[in-house]
Image (cartoon, rainbow, N blue to C red):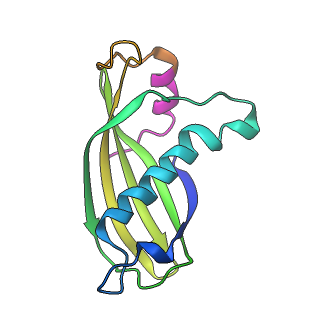
């Protein structure tokens, strides 16, 4: 299963070349990730999950440039690997024009007390497993 989140490209995210700046793709992924772990859960009466995770690694493949602000994209998120304290998330940023970018982040669960990596809890692992697919 994949989570889908609609995101709007902001005019201010366009760069001097007139296209979406490379760093903005990671912001779009971050907003979609927040929707997945926080905002989409709220209407269901569910608490946020993984409020204590950090990004340990991020990579982006830029495929079709975005040349306009106020442009809506769909961000699909799914899990490609679950470890003891980390997991990999995959993203596809698409519109009617096609796939704009594919990316991956390595997320690490962190103890808020120690600020160090912690084990993924069983309920978190079960939730992640509902989104587990093969990597692209």
What residue lies at 41% left-to-right and 18% top-to-bottom? 112
| Magenta-span inclusion, residue 134 | yes
Total count of labels: 0
What residue lies at 46% left-to-right and 32% top-to-bottom? 128
Q: Position of residue 68 (x, y in %)?
A: 47, 84
> Looking at the rendering, which quadrant does residue 4 occupy?
bottom right
Q: Nearer the viewer, residue 98 or 39?
A: 39
**Is residue 105 shown left or right of residue 77?**
left
Is 112 situated above or below 64? above
**Is residue 70 shown left or right of residue 134?**
right
Quadrant containing the C terminus is: bottom left
Is 42 situated above or below 109? below
Is 110 situated above or below 10? above
Image: magenta residue range: 124-136
Q: Position of residue 123 (x, y in %)?
A: 52, 18
Q: Nearer the viewer, residue 95 or 67?
A: 67
Q: Position of residue 30 (x, y in %)?
A: 44, 50
**Is residue 81 shown left or right of residue 1?**
left
What residue lies at 39% left-to-right and 78% top-to-bottom? 14
| Magenta-span inclusion, residue 67 | no
**Is residue 35 shown left or right of residue 78?**
right
Whether residue 133 is visible here, answered yes or no, is yes
Whether residue 135 is visible here, answered yes or no, is no
Q: Residue furthest top?
A: 113
């Amino acid at each position: 299963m994949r989570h889908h989140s609609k995101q709007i490209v902001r005019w201010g995210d366009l760069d001097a070349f007139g296209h979406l700046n490379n760093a903005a793709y990671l912001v779009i992924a971050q907003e979609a990730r927040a929707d997945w772990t926080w905002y989409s859960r709220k209407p269901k009466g569910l608490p946020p999950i993984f409020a204590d995770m950090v990004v340990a690694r991020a990579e982006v493949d830029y495929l079709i440039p975005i040349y306009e602000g106020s442009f809506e994209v769909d961000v699909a998120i799914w899990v490609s690997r679950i470890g003891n304290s980390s997991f990999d998330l995959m993203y596809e940023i698409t519109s009617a024009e096609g796939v704009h970018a594919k990316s991956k982040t390595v997320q690490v669960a962190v103890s808020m007390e120690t600020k160090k990596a912690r084990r993924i809890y069983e309920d978190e692992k079960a939730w992640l497993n509902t989104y587990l697919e093969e990597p692209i």
